[in-house]
Amino acid sequence: MPAKPHRTIRLKDYKPASHEIDSVDLDINLEPEKTRVTARLKMRPNPARETLADKLVLVGQGLELVEVKLSGRKLGAKDYAVTADSLTIKAVPEKPFTLEITTICNPQANKALTGLYRSRDMYCTQCEAEGFRRITYYLDRPDVLSIFTTRIEADAEAAPVLLSNGNLVESGKVGKTGRHYAIWHDPFKKPSYLFAMVAGKLAHIRDTFKTMSGRKVELRIYVEPGKEDRCGWAMDSLKRSMAWDERRWGREYDLDIFMIVAVSDFNMGAMENKGLNVFNDKLVLASPETATDGNFESIEAVIGHEYFHNWTGNRITCRDWFQLCLKEGLTVFRDQEFTADERSGTVERIAAVRGLRAAQFPEDAGPLAHPVRPSSYIEINNFYTATVYQKGAEVCRMLQTTLGLDGFRKGMDLYFERHDGEATTVEKFVACFEDACGVDLKQFMLWYSQAGTPELVCSLRYDTKSQTAELTVEQSLSPSPGQPKKKPYQIPLRMGLIGSNGQDIELQLEDGSEPRDGVIELTRAREKIRFKNVPSKPVASLLRGFSAPVNLTFDQSVEDLEFLMVHDSDLYNRWQAAQTYATRVIINSMKSAKATTQPGLELAMALRHTVSDESLEPAYRAQFMSLPSEPDLARQIRSNVDPAAIHEARDRVLKVVGQELAELLQQLYERNRAKGTYSPDAANAGKRSLRAAALSLLVRRGLPADITLAAKHFGEARNMTDQLTGLGLLADIAGPERTRALAAFEKQWSGDLLVMDKWFAVQAMSDLPDTAEQVEALLRHPLFSLHNPNKVRALIGSFAQANQLNFNRPDGKGYQLVVSSIIELDGFNPQVAARMLGAFRSWQTLEPGRRKLASKALETVRSHPGLSRDAYEIVTKMIGSEE
Ligand code: PHE
Ligand code: ZN
């Protein structure tokens, strides 16, 4: 039975709301299964409305309506109409009025984790994008901004802490009922998606921050009692975020208190609710024993991200959900810049590009491709994507590259000045840069409307006689769903020409001008750029710092790549040269598996120089020796992908590299041992990552001594970073060491659910042949639960999205396993189920055997009765574009 079609929402159909809401008074009476909410809305017709305002349609879901009063008068059943997702008041006056609505909802039964729900014993809310309608009937859309006052009442023992947005204005007991209440008032207008409320048994840590204008802000992080000692890093990150936003962008915090609450059951990473951020606990809680360096880094980045939303998202919000990148792309860009400034710019850039290529490029190349600003959707929750977030951030970065740091800052200043307090659009955002810098960004706007990753094909010709170098660049863009034909982009191409002495040659264009910071602005489908006064044949370094989200094809010799790996002044491109080189070696070795020379010998030699260069940061050198992943290689191969063949070829090459560099790797491993107590800072983390990279290449050799070393690394670990490095390596090696390590880890950490997520993930990512069976067994492990999204991501997500080899097992076992879990999950948490389905986004690039099995698995999902709208949209797009 085919799932029923769902309504498509389109950007071009946007219309202003019929009414404005001047203020909202919420009265939330918490009971596990019957929470009573009264909303008093002061409303008036919207002057910008395009329709009559003689009736009012509010949205609501899963609500039991108790009573409606219009300007004090109780309405009878004839005065309104209720459907499964709306409440229509048939006649309202075309002047200001108040509406008082009382409803009941059931937080205990809410397993979708949107709206008001319970996480363990806590009450919490998640309203973005459309969760507020599960709390009360409302104009639940981002362009309706209002002032919220929230009264929360609950059992004083079950929920001693009551929190909402803004400032606490009153609290006290409710007679002798055993209940108590708190009233919060948020003086800033906000859309309903930024509303939050939390209640429960919570402990907190506190600190203060003095803003640049001298105001004192109270900072609090709330957690389950007993976890307070794991909040220090989050607090430290918060204070550094606040200071950085002032320093770098002149943005100051605006309320007297800023609160973060960590919850265990959360669909996403975190949420920027005004003054009351709600976080997935894995992005708050950290101690050296329980969190890895990577966890510490993500906590810093996400704390920053949500905090930065206060200006880019909350003070200035989105007019409609099509504008999501306006807040998300920009805020990711801001958090990336924060990480770059706090840590290392190059290492951050490499990480961001790895992430973009791993998550966004395949999205852009497959059936789920959509522009940074989509023009239609069925379920908005499906559009919190790598394209909106990461590519959206790249678009902001390109603006900064094109306009320069100062020009970009001027545009941002104007944006804050012009649009503070508004719900606005991408056009208005870009217009600020045009106005502040006096430039025309019409062509640039195509980055928001066209999907797909542009291909740049470059070639370089040198003419000795005239001493000129000529770069030819062609850009092209293949069709994507709904977009058969595309226009050329404006692309900032940062580049350099390097002389035989290894030094950059001053770039001089034909007209004598010098490109600023080495940036050439491409605007046409094909262009030639001529550089004069080039004394000898140069080596070109193109797309430095990955100045645009494109695929670059540039026919470079192995010698040129080796030269760049050693000499490029742009460290990002040195790393890129190594990646390109390694990719070439591995893919060539797939084509001729019986080649006489050992593939990887020259690669090892080429890597040696940089890896052993003590003047470079350890974290950078660790990145340098982390060779392309299996999905990286699959992306280069593009069609008829055989994941097993990729795995084998990569293994073969890495083994040779491990053997060739063994001595150096052993030295790195020994010399970078951390001294003293653990510190999560970038320098110390960098050393650990260098040791881990060295160890992981060494282990590739597969010698008994290597396995012993990995086991020793695990056994002697004094922090989670080292412990997990050891466990991850052993997880790929069948034998007693593996069994012992997994058992020891489980025994040590079975009381800590967050740490156990790592134990699930490590097994799901193993390349051993029975991994699918292991995952199947782990689904029945007593600590596993489909109701906890972190568990789902750790076990099913890691297997489907980070284990290319075993998810794509040739007998289809991987697909079946994932699909049956997704179907079960979709029954109560469609948002996470739909996200998991994304694992299939590249199924059409597989070789025919696997393609057929994947298609069958997707068909099983599509034909499942009662499929959610979320899963329906993803699965139909995924299958649909095959014709
Ligand atoms: N707005 C959140 C962020 O990126 C993401 C989010 C979306 C969280 C929807 C929950 C639900 O910061
Ligand atoms: Zn965000």
Image (cartoon, rainbow, N blue to C red):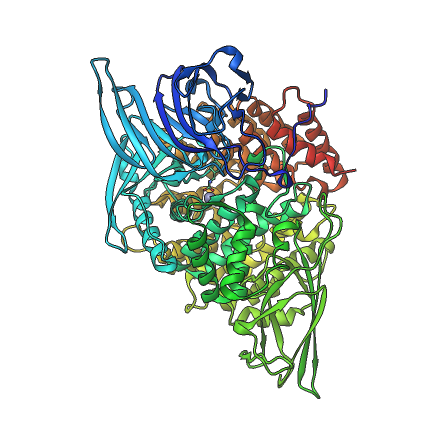
Q: In this view, does 684 lie to the left or right of 839?
A: left
Q: Identify the residue shown where x is 69% and y is 39%.
A: 843
- Picture mark count: 0
Q: Quadrant of the N terminus?
A: top right
- Relative to 521, does residue 37 appear above or below in the rendering? above
Q: Which of 161 and 790 is in front in this view?
A: 161
Residue 229 visible in rendering: yes
Outermost residue, top direction? 77
Q: Identify the residue shown where x is 33% and y is 44%.
A: 234
Q: Nearer the viewer, residue 723 or 880?
A: 880
Q: Which of 734 and 460 is in front in this view?
A: 460
Outermost residue, bottom direction? 465
Q: In which quarter of the image is the C terminus?
A: top right
- Relative to 732, does residue 621 appear above or below in the rendering? below
How far across and down, in percent of the image, does residue 255 sit?
Answer: 30, 43
Outermost residue, right direction? 883
Residue 224 visible in rendering: no
Q: Identify the residue shown where x is 24% and y is 46%.
A: 208
How far across and down, in percent of the image, does residue 472 sit?
Answer: 70, 71
How far across and down, in percent of the image, does residue 16 sit?
Answer: 55, 37
- Relative to 235, does residue 349 appear above or below in the rendering? below
